[in-house]
Image (cartoon, rainbow, N blue to C red):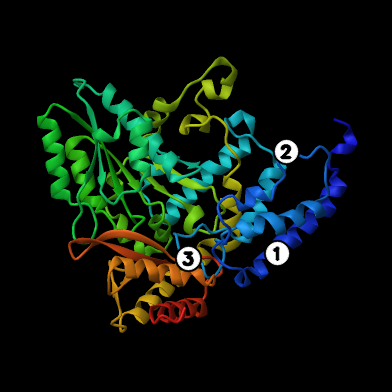
Amino acid sequence: MPDDDHMSPGQFRELGGKLLDYIADYREGIADRPVLSRVEPGEVAARLPAGPPLQGDSLAGILEDIDEIVMPGITHWQSPGFFGYYPANSSLPAVLAELLCAGLGVQGMSWVTSPACTELEVRILDWLAEMLGLPDSFRSDSAGGGGVIHGTASEAVLAVMVAARERRKQAEGYAGGELTAYCSAQAHSSVPKAALICGIGTENLRQVEVQEDLAIDPQALESAIEADLAAGRSPFFLCATVGTTSSCAIDSVAELGRLARRYDLWLHVDAAYAGNACVCPEFRSMIEGVELADSFNCNPHKWLLTTFDCSTLWVSDRECFTGALSVTPEYLRSPQGDRGEVIDYRDWQVPLGRRFRSLKLWFVMRWYGVEGLQNFIREQVRLAELFAELLRPDDRFELAAPGRLGLVCFRFVGSDDENRELLEAVNSGGEIFLTHTVIPVGGKEKYVLRFATGSISTREEHVRRAWEIICSAAAGDA
């Protein structure tokens, strides 16, 4: 390739400024865009040429196509009217960090490939463990714990399930019975997917019934474990969910921890969304008993203003964890690694390669500080509570689950079809976006609307406006 086909540092400086202006303009005007994309299936692809470009283009030409082709197909997750899923916040300090990460082009698969990539991550994960109130056993300076940044919570639960499987197979007295794993019936789909991928199979995953508050029933769990033992099976893994996707239900980590110790199960705490709130001491009661866990996961890319992807995982026994995932051909060895002087994060994850993800978490921590992150979480919880307060006096609606953190589950007092129609009417206006789930309400599975605060740009006026839109749709005015 001729050198003049490459972008020079001078061109990058000039065009990079224009791209930053484009992003800043987008964020400034995001509230004026329909939150939910309105394109039909195949519409974006139909606007693209059938074949690749033979000649290069300018940034101006590329941005023109971004406006005309890509933007109509974007659902705007950073919009103040985005109340659909748990947030995927992308603060501008984190955006800058992503730019630096791409600019440095680091491949951080092992310590020697970029020592700063590894050592910054080790320290940042210790900082975050302290911020969340996690036990010292999860810190890198403990007897054997430590943290790592994965791409998603799905990767994390797969990795720890593999480690738990290997621990059980290598345990003294293991008789070779079928391995069985356990989680709540409300647990995330990543748990059965992990069981599929690591060879356990969903037929050996017990999705245990829940109590009225939608948390796992410890008695039903113990009965399931005892039944498997009686049948000659080998229970090995238990996932506690702190903040389920549907309703933010919270399993009792302390109770499940005691059962895990009694039956020698690996206890993993999936706190992908709710765990972030533990930066505020007043919310830490929901992880009481976490010192009994073998692993803990939360996603700063959900609620700690850190651009996707950034999922943090801690383990209390890193030797057991990495032993299950480590494969070291000669070309990946280093003197430092062979001497055990360093962490090679390739042994802490499923893929080999890894980006310098700790940079963006570091930028966010440095920009906001602990107090800034606490203030953000507390304000978003307050906004969810405000929405619930607006809803309670209106007898056309009912709360469908206990309000927790930034999520309110509610429904129109009527049939499931009426709630579907209401959701469609609310979302069709383009100003706000909600999602739905199906959960037990009064002993019967019902269609429920989810209102999740947490978008970086959401303020009180946006919550009040959302309630106006919902009331208008319920009255048939939408």
Q: Which mark is residue 51?
A: 2
Q: What x and y, as percent, mark residue 237? A: 27, 36
Measured Cα–Cα span from mark 3 to mark 1: 20 Å
> The residue under label 3 is which amino acid type?
Gly
Residue 344 visible in this rendered orientation of the protein: no
Residue at 62% from the left image edge and 28% from the top image edge = 112
Residue at 52% from the left image edge and 45% from the top image edge = 123
Badge 3 marks a residue whose secondary structure is: loop
Camera-near label (2 vs 1) is: 2
Badge 1 marks a residue whose secondary structure is: helix
Q: What x and y, as percent, mark residue 405? A: 37, 66
Q: What x and y, as percent, mark residue 297? A: 40, 47
Badge 2 marks a residue whose secondary structure is: loop
Q: Quadrant of residue 278?
A: bottom left
**Are dots 3 and 1 in contact, CB under 8 Å?**
no
Sequence-wise, the earlier of marks 2 and 3 is 2
Q: Residues within 10 Å of mark 3 (few under 14, many from 20)?
A: many
Measured Cα–Cα span from mark 2 to mark 3: 40 Å
Near-viewer residue (169 or 76): 76
> The residue under label 2 is which amino acid type?
Gly
> The residue under label 1 is which amino acid type?
Ala
For mark 3, what is the residue? 454
Residue at 44% from the left image edge and 67% from the top image edge = 424
- 189 horizontally vs 335: left or right: left
For mark 1, what is the residue? 24
**Are dots 2 and 1 in contact, CB under 8 Å?**
no
Q: Quadrant of the N terminus?
A: top right
